[in-house]
Image: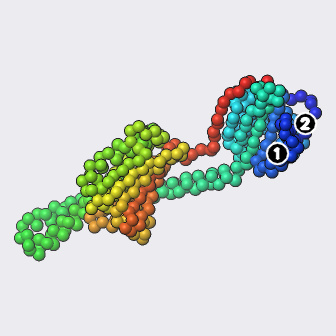
Amino acid sequence: MPRDNRTPRPSSVPAPPGQGLDQQAAIKNVVASMSDGLMVINQDGEIVFTNPALTGILDLLPDQMLGRGWAELFFKDPANREFNQIIVDIITESIYHYNKQVTYKVPAGGTKDLIITTALLPSEEDGKEVGGVLVMFKDVSELTQMHRRSRELLRQSRRLFQEKLEGLDRLARAVAHEIRNPVTTIGGLAGRLLADKPPESRDARYLQRILDGTARLERMVEEVRIYADLPAPVRRPANLAEWLGKVVAPFRSLAKKQGVRLSLSGAGKGHQAAEAMIDPPLLAKVLEIILTNALEAMPQGGQLKVGLMCDSVSGVIAVSDTGKGMSPADLPYVFDPFFTTKADAVGMSLAIAKRIALEHQGDITVASRPGCGTTFTLTIPQDGGLGGELDTEAQSRPPEMK
C-alpha cells in the first residue's frame, strides 16, 4: 500500500451523520471492550484506527501503527509472507470479505496463530467506491496448539494401533498356519472312526464331540485367515448416501422374513450427501457385519434403523436395533478378537469391522443396554484423514479500490 506524509488521524470512530454523542460514545465503548483486535486502513494505505486489543495481539503500540502503512510495518519480515499476502489479495483483487487463519511473527520473538477477517469499507463521499479496509484479528494460538497436540496424540494412537494390528496380523497368520493342518487331520481321522461306530454308542458320542470341536476350530482358522488377509483400503471418492443405499438393499428381504422393520434415512439414490474417500467394497463389509449382528439379535422381529448424517468434516452412520442388548461388562471387549457371547461364534467379525474402519482413518463405536437394543456408530472422515487448519474465504467484488 502507498503511504504519504499526512498527519496521523486520531484513533477514534467518527459518528455517522445524524447520530448523537451518546451513540458515538456507545460505539467507542463497544469497540474498546472487544477482545478481538480491530484495524481500519484508509484508501491511501494508512492505518487510521486501532482498538486496545490489537496492541496485545500484534505486540505493537498504537503510536507504532497509526499513520503508517501495512507494508512499512510488516513486509520487512519474510516470516510474515502468508500474513502479508492477505492484504495484498484484498487490495489487488478487491475481495470484499476474506477469512483465513495464518501465522504471525511477533516483533519480540515467537509466533501467534491468528484468524484474520476483513471487509472493504465504502467511501464517505458516495458510498459506492471503496474507502478503506476493516481488518479484525482473533488470536487462536492456544486453541490451535491444543488442536495440534490432539492431532499429534491421534497420530501416535494410530501408530500404536498399527503396531498392534501388525502384531495381531503375525499372530493370526501363525494361528492359521499352525492349526489348519493338525485340525484337518484330527477331523478327518475322527470322521473315519465314527463311520465304523454304532450311532448310539459311547465312542460315537465322543468322536462326534471331536468333530464338533474341529469344525469350530476350522471356522476360527478361516476367520483368522480373513482377518490376516484383509487388503489395505484403496480409497476413491464415493457418495455416501448412494453407497449406503446399495449396501442396505440386500438386507431388506432378510429383515422382512423375520418380521424386522428396516428403515433407512439420509441415504439412497437422490440424496446429496457429501463425498468421502473410501474403499466401497471393503467398507461395505463393516455395514454387512453390523447389520447381520442386528438381525441376529432380533430373531422374533423388531425394528432396525439405519441413518446417515453428514457435515463438513465426516459422515456418520448409525445402526440401531431393538434386540436384547449387551451387558455393560461386555461392551469394552466387543471389538477384541475372539470375544463373543454366542455359543457357536468365533468372535472375529467385529474385530474385522473395527480394523477396516480404523484403516479408513475413521472409527466404529457401540452403545447398548440390556433389553433396550444396541446402536453401532461408524464415523468416516470426508477428507480421508486428519483435517487441516482453518482456511475459508467468502468473496465478492465491489468497485475497484481507488
- The residue at which mark 2 appears reads as 9
Which of the 4 image quadrants contains residue 125?
Answer: top right
Considering every residue shown, the one lying at the far right of the view is 7
| Label 2 – label 1 distance at C-alpha | 18 Å
**Quadrant into which the N terminus falls:** top right
Image location of residue 275, percent across then percent down: 47, 40
311 or 347, which lies in front? 311
Q: Residue at x 79, y 43 (%)?
A: 38
Image location of residue 360, percent across then percent down: 45, 48
**Quadrant into which the C terminus falls:** top right
Q: Residue at x 18, y 65 (%)?
A: 211
Can you tell which of label 2 and label 1 is closer to the viewer? 1
140 or 270, which lies in front? 270
Which type of secondary structure does the marked residue at label 2 adopt?
loop
Q: Which mark is residue 27?
A: 1
Answer left or right for 21 relative to 332. Answer: right
Q: Which mark is residue 189?
A: none
